[in-house]
Amino acid sequence: MTTSTTSLFRAEDLCKSYHSGTEQIHVLRGVNLSINTGEMMAIIGASGSGKTTLLQILGTLDSPDSGELFFKDTSLGRKTDQELCHFRNRSVGFIFQFHHLLPEFTALENVMMPGLIAGRKKEEMEGPAHHLLKQVELDHRTGHKVGELSGGEQQRTALARALIMKPALLLADEPTGNLDSRSGHLVFELIRSLCKELSLASIMVTHNTKLAKQMDSYSTLKDGILQQL
């Protein structure tokens, strides 16, 4: 696959394998992709095909055995662990199938959390967090704790949290997988509209082919190879 040196984010020849006893399992066999600002890309594939592993590597939560990641033409493989933590906090938003919200905090506090972790003051983060919760139609639920929110509301809170640091890249792992069809549709439409409004590059792993076909491009991960459809 030909990649552009002007891409916001690209992966080149990513390989990853694991050992199971004496057997070596090849999960990724030279994966290439590139994405530009404002684009939405879907990755589909069967369970166990390595989609989540690929997304974790793209988000620098895991490391490939070989290959490189580039953000604005800068190699991420040459960064220290501390630099990668800073990169994830400032440049990447994550949405997972399971929202991973902190149950002891309110929706508003959960959305502010990445900013607080980055050392910003609560007073600085409250306004942007309120604004994002309004954008995901949860301005009436800001003071509610996680257990008081429905599944769809929890995932919309997770979306707001993913966007609070104004990232350039949004990575979503089955963000509608645990939701009913109505809630899943709402979450997807919010992701799509906010990506366009905020000029985000977005890579979404999904089993939902119907959703994948609504994005700018979609590829399938099979036998460790990513093939654009």
Image (cartoon, grey):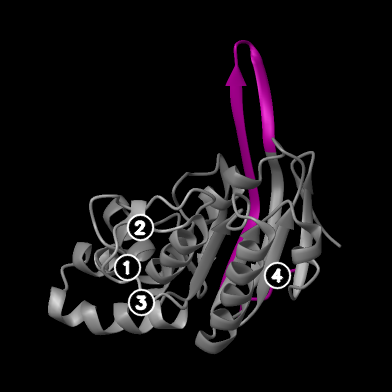
Q: Which mark is residue 3?
A: 4
- Identify which residue is drawn at 57% across, 76% down: 190
Density class for disc 2 (Cα within 10 Å; few <14, some 14-19, many ≥20) is some
Q: CA distance from mark 2 to mark 4?
A: 23 Å
Residue 34 magenta-highlighted: no
**In the rendered structure, which segment of residues is drawn in magenta?**
1-27
Q: Secondary structure at mark 1?
A: helix
Q: Which mark is residue 84?
A: 2
Horizontal side of 81 relative to 222 (left or right) equals left
Question: Disc 4 vs disc 3: which is toward the camera?
Answer: 3
**Magenta stretch secondary structure, dominant:** strand
**Residue at position x 54%, y 81% in the image:** 194
Give, as a three-letter code, the residue at label 3.
His
The mark that comes first in sequence, 1 or 4, is: 4
Cα separation between marks 1 and 2: 21 Å
SS class, disc 4: loop
- Please tell me whether mark 1 or mark 2 is closer to you in this view: 1
List x then y, in percent, for residue 159. 46, 67
- Separation (CA) of disc 3 from disc 2: 35 Å
Q: Are marks 3 and 2 in contact (CB under 8 Å)?
A: no
Is there any visible trace of residue 1 in the rendered image? no
Q: Identify which amino acid the numbered label 1 is placed on.
A: Val
Vertical order, 228 against 163 (above or below): above
Q: Which residue is mark 3?
A: 140
Amino acid under label 4?
Answer: Thr
What residue did someone put label 1 on? 111
Q: Spatial distance from mark 4 to mark 3, Cα to Cα?
A: 44 Å
